[in-house]
Amino acid sequence: MPQALRAPLVVEFPFTRSLGPVQSAFLTGLRERTVLGVRTTDGKVLVPPVEYDPLTAEEIRDLVEVAPTGTVTTWAWNPAPRRGQPLDRPFAWVLVRLDGADTALLHALDAPDGPATVRTGMRVRVRWAAHRTGAITDIACFEPYDGTAPPTDPPRPHTGRFDDPVTGIVAPARLDYAYAPGRAQSAYLHALAERRTVGERCPDCRKVYVPPRGACPTCGVATAERVEVGPRGTVTTYCIVNIKAKNLDIDVPYVYAHIALDGADLALHGRIGGIPYDQVRMGLRVEPVWTDADSRYPDHYRPTGEPDADYDTYKELL
């Protein structure tokens, strides 16, 4: 029986966005050790602030300054921090309602004596980062605070104006997980290592799906009959890529295409090489190219030199 496959997988990309006046003031304020909220039309103060009232959808810009102290409303212990989290030692995730605010802010609480010292209702204060850039990480974390809650005076209005305001942010998004492909895809990957492409046929509609998923997406029944397809195929649709991806050593522009392998009823995707990008077309006949002796999948597909496929032979696979 083939060995079950399992591999670490990381999905990572930088998310870049511009900031409106409210978010710009909030993040710039953190850089200046000032916590700002926004007052809604019914008088509630939201921290972190939003640009539209969550109840009425009206635009709101009435900024106010709240205190850097607050009360824990709920918490959860994190015994094993992961890469990129606020602290590199066990800590608590907490929701903190800052003094003067009506909503809670999610952040980390440094609790070096363990979870027994954390409780709902405990008083905490902001620990500012030594180097601040205008990001939520300017709050390094919260820490326990012995002071009592101040009088319930209304928060002070704030103009939101600072020198050199933050107008945009780049937030790295990353997901780390272990991927286990399952029976059908494991067989597909094992076959690719032998430079073969294997799909599975539906017992009802008789369509062959590549890569296989273990079930027919049309009929919803399990698939088990394996069918070798290709290796040649037909370009059904394609796009020209003009933006170079990080850590990808491929010159732009290049073509990424859907390719219907001979004998398959579902097109898979692959890069087209061996031909100028502006000569790739629907119906182009292609074959896989493995660049290394031990490669487990084709590097790209290249033209076979055959006449283009007739549109009627692949129109159902678009």
Image: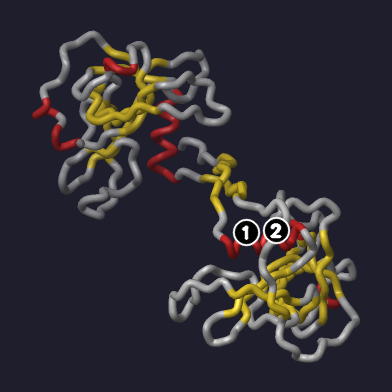
Residue closer to the observer: 57 or 83: 57
Residue placed at 43% from the left, 32% from the top? 189
Query: Which element carries disc 1, helix, strand or loop?
Result: helix
Q: For the residues marked 2 and 1, what is the alpha-carbon distance in whole angstroms?
A: 6 Å
Q: Residues within 10 Å of mark 2 (few under 14, many from 20)?
A: many
Asked whether residue 75 appears in the rendered view, the answer is no
- Amino acid carrying label 1: it is Ser
Locate residue 292 relative to residue 156 in the image: left or right: left
Q: Is residue 154 visible?
A: yes
Q: Are marks 2 and 1 in contact (CB under 8 Å)?
A: yes
Q: Residue furthest top?
A: 305
Residue 306 drawn at (x, y percent): 19, 11
Residue 28, which numbered label?
2
From the viewer's side, name the closer residue of 185 and 54.
54
Residue at x-position 75% and y-position 65%: 108
Q: Position of residue 291 (x, y in %)?
A: 47, 14
Task: Kindly identify the residue that appears in the image at 21 percent across and 28 percent down.
Answer: 263
Mark 1 sits on what residue?
A: 24
Q: Nearer the viewer, residue 293 or 150?
A: 150
- Location of the C terminus (image quadrant): top left
Render colour scheme: secondary structure
User: Which quarter of the figure has residue 94?
Assistant: bottom right
Residue neighbourhood size for the residue with mark 1, other residues' Cα within 10 Å, grouped as few (<14), some (14–19), many (≥20): many
Is residue 314 shown above or below 301? below
Type of amino acid at the residue the image marks with label 2? Thr
**Compared with residue 107, is residue 248 higher up or lower down, i.e. above or below?**
above
Could you tell me which residue is drawn at 41 percent across and 21 percent down? Answer: 253
Say which element carries label 2. Answer: helix
Tell how many labels.
Answer: 2
151 horizontally vs 269: left or right: right
